[in-house]
Amino acid sequence: MILLGYLCILSCWITGAHPLAVLIQTPSEILAAKGEEIKLSCIVKGAHLNDVYWYKIDRSSTARFVKSASVMNNQVQGDGITQRFELDRNDFQQSFSLTIQDLHLSDNGTYYCLMSEPQKMSWGAGSVVTVVPERQKVTSPPPTTRRRIHRYKYPNISRKKKGSGNGYTCNWVVWGSLVSCNLLLLISIVVIVIHRRKRDSRRRCPHQFRKR
């Protein structure tokens, strides 16, 4: 980290008013398991592809040189860097990348791409690489752990379709029959009441009916 700070100060002091190239680094972060392979990419905007570098900053904030490639693609690798690290540059697409094969847990850290020009130096935003022992497998819980919910269904008379042969539905025929029965019952009651009143009146005044 201290080395990158010195490079940043030196770059700002040397470049002055000269515009810096823009390095678009992807991905910003990546999670992979031990033994897998990852690829970090860097695209150069605003300048021609020149000498390129890859640096790594571990959790202890120690900067470590990984690999570099000159304009003629002469590559240099840092101390302890094996063939698992491959640097590839593409002058036509103005990009370069770092591929790490057979990931180790020690590969954890933040990787930065850099490019140097005469009196200039530019670098990317960094890629955070996290290596885990193994990927967690997402499994569904066993059936015994799921709690069954019993739902009781009650008959809903109002929602049943008309004309169905079964159920509790009261269609217009049934309602008509009920109304007719009620009317007949009411008429019968009225007739009985009138008849009783007439009979009672005859019993009370039999002489009036005889005179008539």
Image (tube, grey):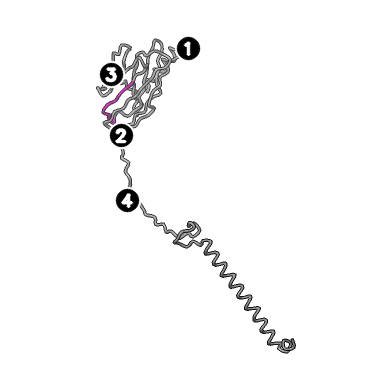
Dot 1 lies on which element? loop
Q: Are marks 3 and 4 in contact (CB under 8 Å)?
A: no
Residue 162 located left or right of residue 145: right
Query: Residue 103 in magenta?
Result: yes
Please rate how many residues cluster around mark 1, counting C-alpha atoms within 10 Å: few if below 14, some from 14 to 19, many from 20: few
Q: Is-magenta flag for residue 29?
A: no
The residues bearing labels 2 and 1 have C-alpha atoms spaced at a distance of: 44 Å
Disc 3 marks which residue?
Answer: 77
Residue position for label 2: 132
Distance from disc 1 to disc 4, alpha carbons, whole Å, reads 68 Å
Q: Which residue type carries mark 4?
A: Pro
Give the mark nearer the N terminus: 3 vs 4: 3
Considering only vertical position in the picture, is 119 above or below 101? above
Q: Amino acid at mark 2?
A: Val
Comes first in the chain, label 3 or label 1: 1
Please, what is the three-letter code of the amino acid marked with disc 1? Answer: Ala
Q: Residue at x 39, y 57 (%)?
A: 150
- The mark nearer the N terminus, 2 or 1, is 1
Question: Which numbered disc, 2 or 4, marks the residue that appears first in the sequence?
Answer: 2
Tell me, for residue 143, which label it has, or none. 4
Query: Where residue 199 appears, x then y in whole percent?
Result: 66, 84
Q: Which residue is mark 1?
A: 17
- Identify whether 201 is placed above or below 15: below
Residue at 74 percent across and 88 percent down: it is 211
Identify the magenta region. Answer: 97-105
The tag earlier along the polypeptide, 1 or 4, is 1
